[in-house]
Image (tube, rainbow, N blue to C red):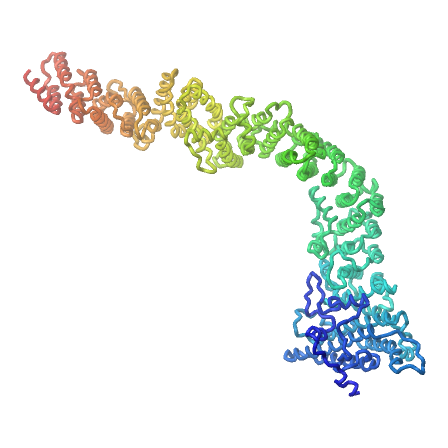
């Protein structure tokens, strides 16, 4: 024996063999190995396995199992060298004995395994070596059978060679050895628990326990036995191989075929048992993502078995893979004992039906693996198993889940399967069909809109790719009826042309519905009905299915529950959306739907309808609005008779809506208007680029005009009736703006009563009319003025139906809204919701108005630049008023000035009417704003208001605001704004050509009234310093117009507040004098004629009043007047002062002689020259007085006069001398 195994039999390695040959010879044979593979979603198999290494492919193609191996004369097996071509025949028992010996050694290592980590590496390498020896031997057996085994021939007893005899007996001997090996390794299910636990080893490393090697060696042996038996049968060319010694010992036949079937069934049974054990730990929601194999090696074994059995079925006409599986699972499902060949299958499965579905589904997934081990989507390498699945469906229809739909993706859909499912669902259409393990998550699939319903139908018709997260999510979200619809859609999709299977399915579906069946449907059942027909309509003949659906829905009574009506309309609108998607006319569907809507809207409008019923009716009506809005939003052309959905029912619906319902209806209207304009503009833009555009464009435009006509007829009259509402909904402005822009885009679509200038007519209704609420105006105009095309057209369009241009009317509306912005506050002055809305919208409108071309030109000509991006409305109004006044003042041509007056009056309109609500209200902010705004106009437009065209407005302002009968509420507003009025009236009175005198008289009246009104009873510096008349008269740099105003005020002051009645001083004299002093002090006037206006009154106060405060104030004022007059007349005494003083002396001589001298002493101290000029007059007056008395010289009077003369220098001394000489 030693000679047989001597190393001399091993041929030398050729010196010319390259490294590749050496490497090739040392390549390990394929084997089961999961240590290098992670269980990832891509399903990659081990690179060391039989599939990836090409072993399976070579087996199926009947090629050499290892073409690059065993090419030498000898082969090293179990540490010995053997003759490659004869070893297995000559030493069959010995080799298999050594093979069993290695298995025993590996089992011993498993038993001796300990937790000593120091020995783990050593044990791993020993176990790995033993396993590799066994795998190498099994590979050699396969190669030997393929290369060297020849079918047995009849041998002549006398001439046969011993090797030929052994060769003839080899198939039987090999069969017996294989049988012995199967008995040795046993079944997978009988392996010890510590070995089976190696299936679940996580985080494979480089060091593995012996149990892992033993377990995977068993898998190698089980697979190799089947391969060897398959190769043996193939090489024997149909000859049956008997195990003769086994037959002789037991009397039972053992053939290669019987051993193959027995071993195969045992292996399938054990693999199924392992899968059953794993299924017991799988959650229902994870059934699709949890696989049936324990590790990738068992998955690979399933793939190998599948391919081998399918190959044998085609080549040898044996049972297919599915036949074996069905025979194995059918008794389990039916609860019967397993067949004899499948003995050992566990009987304690917790859910036989669920497990069967799970296993069949996951086994079908293996059909996507190619013979090379790659996963190829949509590749079906495994036939379908509908026969068995049909049996399962009859047992488990109500538990339909995504596993079933997965089979439809893997296999060609089955009409019989769909029919079986439909028989169940048609009987239980009103059920919820919730998957038990999903709980309430399956209930969240209610579609609240037609588009949502159609999307759900679309999702049923387009399953996500297999193994994708989206597909896995179906298991967690869909109820079983939705899964059935997916199966149905797949089946209908296989025959798009409407062939026999499709017609059969439609016929079966139609046949299950009768009038009674339809009337018995619950809401859930009706929803399922609608979803069913949408799916069928998407996959089959749409018009036929839609017609049948409408016919069946017609069986429902007219007084059906409102929830049913909502669903019916939702489903019909979903069908309309589907027609749109296909480009089909929706007229017929829309007409039926609109008819039902009209009836419901009439009931909603009916005054006899109970409130609770009306509230309930809004459910379907609101749903109709949402659905029709979706129809319009999803349409790209609006040329498929969509206008029929805008029916007469809206004439009944809109007037009956409450506020919240009206908001929904107007929101719907805006959607339709915007979509119509968007589609029409798109068609206009695309038409010139298309050769067939003229004909098509006219047709499309006709359809758009039809939609517009429906909108004008059923919606605009209602909007028009709401325009004067004092509580307009915000959406009213949006909808009105939408109609305005529609009239701009489609002028001919507007009704006749709005022609020929429909845009301006609508703007007059909702934006320019002074009766419309500012909340509506600000929002409405903000929409329109941001449309540059519309603004441009208004700028150049003279055809406005009312006075003024479109831009000036828009400015007038803005001015009114600014003036009325405080009207909507709460009584306590806080902002209401309406006030906040007006404020926000007014800011936006202000920005847009200032960007109008006409307004921009005004601001530029006035050199006023807008700096703020969002200007405050009040400041913007002031800037605008200043701009108009500045531009008017700069005009020289009479015609231009006249035109500017007209335009300016157009800008403000009837401003007194605008502010009247504010004056009537008790809101102080509104009153102050009204007085301030009109005051700004009076001041900055004073030359303009003085013209004949505008002076009537000025007169009304004076009469209405400045000279009213009652000033109780306007006191603060007048105090703040009176300076503006006084200054403006002063200028107007000076430039007016026809009414200057009257205006001056009015100014005097205003000045007199408010001097008196705001003058305190006792002098107060703070109050008088802020007197509005005083503030209006003050100037930093004196001007002629300012001086004229101050002269008028001084005249009014002297005439009305400084007149003595005999010896009695006027009331509030101290306050009046303090006002006079402030007026003179704050202004640097130097004109003696102006300064001397109050001089007589001041002299009289000094002469007659001894009150200290009055005397001091009078003296201060007198000093100011005298000093300024003296400064103005530097060369000679001031003539005006001399004149006043002379008159003062003449008026008071003989009565107040001594007081006159006292007053003149005060003047002489300030300016002796003016008193010196009076010496002749004073002396003459003295003599006349003495003469009248007739008593000679008046010594006391002469003493006082001499005292005065003593202050007058040389002239005085000379006069004293003259008096003494008399």
Residue at 27 percent of width and 20 percent of height: 1059
Measured as percent of width and height from the top left, residue 466 is found at 73, 56
In the rendered picture of this protein, how many numbered marks are placed on residues?
Answer: 0
Residue 871 seen in the current view: yes
Quadrant of the image for the C terminus? top left
Measured as percent of width and height from the top left, residue 28 is found at 72, 74
> Above or below — where is 754 with respect to 246?
above
Q: Which of the 4 image quarters holds residue 1188?
A: top left
> Above or below — where is 378 with respect to 65?
above
Measured as percent of width and height from the top left, residue 456 is found at 72, 47
Q: Which of the 4 image quarters holds residue 741?
A: top right
> Above or below — where is 484 with respect to 145?
above
Q: Which of the 4 image quarters holds residue 1150?
A: top left
Name, please, the residue furthest toward the left. 1221
Front in this rendered view, residue 855 or 29: 29
> Above or below — where is 516 with respect to 1079?
below
Front in this rendered view, residue 666 or 465: 465
Measured as percent of width and height from the top left, residue 730 is found at 57, 34
* Image position of 214 (left or right of 1156): right
Quadrant of the image for the N terminus? bottom right
Name, please, the residue furthest toward the bottom. 2
* Image position of 166 (left or right of 45): right
Residue 212 seen in the current view: no
Residue at 74 percent of width and 57 percent of height: 377
């Amino acid at each position: 024996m030693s000679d047989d195994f001597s190393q001399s039999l091993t041929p030398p390695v050729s010196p010319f063999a390259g490294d590749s040959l050496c490497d090739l010879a040392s390549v390990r044979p394929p084997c089961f190995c999961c240590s290098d593979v992670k269980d990832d979603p891509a399903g990659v198999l081990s690179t060391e396995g039989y599939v990836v290494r090409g072993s399976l492919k070579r087996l199926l193609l009947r090629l050499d199992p290892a073409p690059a191996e065993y090419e030498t004369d000898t082969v090293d097996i179990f540490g010995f060298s053997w003759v490659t071509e004869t070893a297995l025949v000559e030493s069959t028992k010995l080799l298999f004995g050594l093979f069993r010996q290695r298995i025993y050694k590996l089992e011993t290592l498993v038993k001796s395994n300990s937790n000593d980590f120091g020995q783990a590496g050593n044990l791993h390498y020993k176990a790995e070596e033993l396993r590799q020896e066994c795998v190498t031997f099994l590979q050699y057996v396969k190669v030997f059978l393929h290369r060297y085994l020849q079918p047995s021939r009849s041998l002549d007893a006398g001439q046969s060679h011993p090797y030929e005899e052994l060769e003839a007996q080899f198939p039987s001997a090999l069969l017996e050895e294989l049988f012995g090996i199967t008995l040795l390794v046993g079944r997978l299910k009988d392996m010890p628990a510590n070995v089976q636990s190696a299936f679940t080893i996580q985080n494979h490393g480089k060091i593995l326990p012996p149990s892992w090697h033993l377990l995977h060696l068993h898998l190698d042996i089980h697979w190799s036995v089947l391969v060897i038996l398959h190769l043996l049968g193939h090489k024997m060319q149909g000859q049956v191989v008997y195990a003769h010694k086994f037959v002789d010992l037991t009397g039972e036949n053992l053939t290669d075929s019987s051993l193959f079937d027995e071993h195969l069934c045992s292996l399938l049974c054990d693999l199924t048992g392992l899968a059953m054990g794993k299924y017991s730990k799988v959650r229902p929601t994870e059934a699709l993502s949890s696989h049936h194999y324990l590790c990738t090696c068992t998955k690979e074994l399933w793939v190998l078995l599948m391919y081998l059995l399918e190959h044998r079925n085609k080549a040898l006409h044996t049972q297919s893979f599915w036949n074996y599986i069905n025979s194995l699972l059918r008794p389990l499902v039916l609860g019967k004992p397993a067949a004899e060949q499948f003995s050992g299958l566990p009987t304690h499965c917790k859910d036989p039906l669920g497990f069967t579905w799970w296993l069949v589904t996951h086994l079908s997934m293996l059909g996507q693996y190619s013979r090379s081990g790659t996963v190829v989507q949509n590749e079906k390498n495994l036939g379908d198993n509908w026969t068995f699945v049909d049996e399962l469906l009859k047992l488990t229809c109500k538990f339909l889940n995504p596993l079933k739909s997965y089979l439809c993706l893997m296999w060609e859909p089955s009409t019989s399967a769909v029919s079986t499912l439909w028989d169940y669902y048609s009987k239980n259409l009103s059920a919820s069909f919730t998957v038990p393990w999903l709980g309430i998550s399956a209930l969240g699939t209610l579609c609240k809109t037609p588009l949502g319903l159609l999307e759900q139908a679309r999702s049923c018709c387009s399953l996500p790719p297999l193994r994708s997260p989206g597909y896995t999510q179906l298991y967690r979200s869909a109820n079983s009826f939705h899964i059935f619809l997916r199966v149905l859609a797949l089946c209908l999709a296989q025959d798009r042309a409407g062939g026999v299977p499709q017609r059969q399915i439609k016929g079966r579906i139609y046949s299950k519905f009768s009038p009674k069946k339809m009337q018995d449907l619950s809401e859930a059942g009706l929803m399922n009905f609608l979803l069913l027909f949408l799916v069928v309509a998407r996959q089959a003949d749409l018009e036929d299915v839609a017609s049948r659906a409408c016919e069946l829905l017609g069986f429902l009574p007219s007084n059906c529950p409102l929830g049913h009506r909502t669903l019916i309309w939702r489903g019909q609108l979903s069908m309309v959306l589907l027609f749109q998607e296909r480009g089909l006319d929706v007229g017929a569907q829309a007409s039926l739907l609109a008819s039902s809507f009209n009836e419901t809207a009439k009931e909603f409008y009916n005054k006899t309808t109970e409130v609770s019923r009306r509230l309930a009716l809004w459910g379907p009506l609101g749903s109709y609005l949402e659905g029709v809005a979706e129809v319009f939003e999803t349409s790209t052309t609006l040329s498929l008779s969509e206008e029929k959905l805008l029916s007469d029912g809206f004439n009944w619906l809109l007037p009956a809506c409450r506020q919240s319902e009206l908001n929904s209806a107007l929101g719907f209207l805006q959607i339709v208007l915007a979509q119509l304009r968007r589609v029409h503009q798109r068609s206009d833009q695309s038409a010139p680029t298309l050769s067939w555009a003229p004909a098509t464009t006219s047709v499309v435009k006709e359809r758009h005009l039809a939609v517009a006509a429906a909108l004008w007829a059923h919606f605009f009259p209602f909007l028009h009736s709401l325009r004067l509402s004092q509580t307009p909904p915000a959406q009213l402005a949006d909808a009105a703006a939408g109609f305005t822009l529609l009239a701009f885009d489609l002028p001919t679509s507007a009704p006749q009563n709005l022609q020929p200038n429909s845009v301006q007519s609508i703007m007059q209704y909702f934006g320019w009319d002074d009766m419309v609420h500012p909340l509506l105006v600000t929002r409405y105009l903000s929409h329109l003025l941001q449309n540059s095309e519309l603004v441009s057209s208004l700028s150049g369009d003279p055809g406005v139906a009312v006075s003024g241009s479109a831009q000036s009317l828009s400015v007038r509306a803005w001015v009114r809204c600014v003036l009325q912005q405080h009207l909507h506050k709460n009584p306590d002055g806080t902002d209401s919701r309406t006030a906040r809305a007006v404020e926000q919208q007014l800011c936006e409108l202000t920005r847009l108005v200032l960007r109008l071309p006409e307004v921009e030109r005004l601001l530029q000509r006035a050199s006023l630049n807008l700096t703020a991006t969002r200007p405050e409305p009040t400041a913007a109004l002031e800037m605008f008023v200043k701009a108009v006044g500045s531009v008017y003042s700069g005009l020289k041509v009479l015609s231009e000035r006249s035109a500017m007056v007209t335009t300016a009056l157009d800008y403000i309109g009837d401003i007194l009417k605008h502010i009247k609500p504010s004056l009537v209200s008790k809101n102080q902010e509104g009153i102050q704003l009204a007085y301030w705004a009109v005051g700004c106009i009076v001041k900055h437009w004073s030359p303009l208001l003085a013209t004949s065209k505008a002076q009537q407005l000025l007169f009304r302002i004076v009469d209405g605001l400045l000279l009213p009968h009652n000033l109780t509420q306007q006191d603060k507003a007048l105090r703040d704004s009176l300076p503006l009025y006084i200054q403006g009236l002063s200028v107007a009175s000076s430039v007016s050509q026809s009414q200057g005198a009257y205006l001056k008289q009015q100014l005097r009246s205003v000045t007199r009234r408010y001097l008196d009104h705001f003058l305190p009873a006792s002098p107060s510096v703070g109050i008088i310093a802020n007197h509005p008349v005083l503030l209006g008269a003050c100037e930093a740099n004196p001007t002629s117009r300012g001086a004229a105003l101050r002269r008028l005020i001084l005249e009014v002051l002297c005439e009305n507040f400084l007149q003595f009645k005999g010896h009695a001083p006027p009331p509030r004299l101290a306050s009046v004098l303090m006002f006079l002093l402030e007026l003179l002090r704050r202004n640097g006037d130097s004109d003696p004629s102006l300064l001397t206006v109050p001089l007589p009154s001041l002299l009289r106060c000094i002469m007659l009043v001894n009150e200290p405060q009055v005397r001091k104030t009078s003296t201060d004022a007198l000093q100011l007047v005298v000093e300024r007059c003296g400064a103005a007349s530097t060369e000679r005494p001031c003539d005006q002062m001399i004149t006043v003083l002379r008159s003062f002396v003449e008026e008071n001589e003989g009565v107040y002689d001594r007081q006159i001298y006292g007053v003149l002493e005060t003047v002489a101290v300030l300016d002796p020259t003016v008193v010196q000029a009076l010496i002749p007059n004073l002396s003459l007056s003295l003599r006349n007085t003495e003469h009248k008395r007739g008593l000679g010289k008046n010594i006391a009077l002469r003493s006082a006069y001499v005292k005065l003369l003593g202050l007058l220098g040389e002239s005085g001394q000379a006069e004293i001398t003259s008096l003494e000489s008399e």
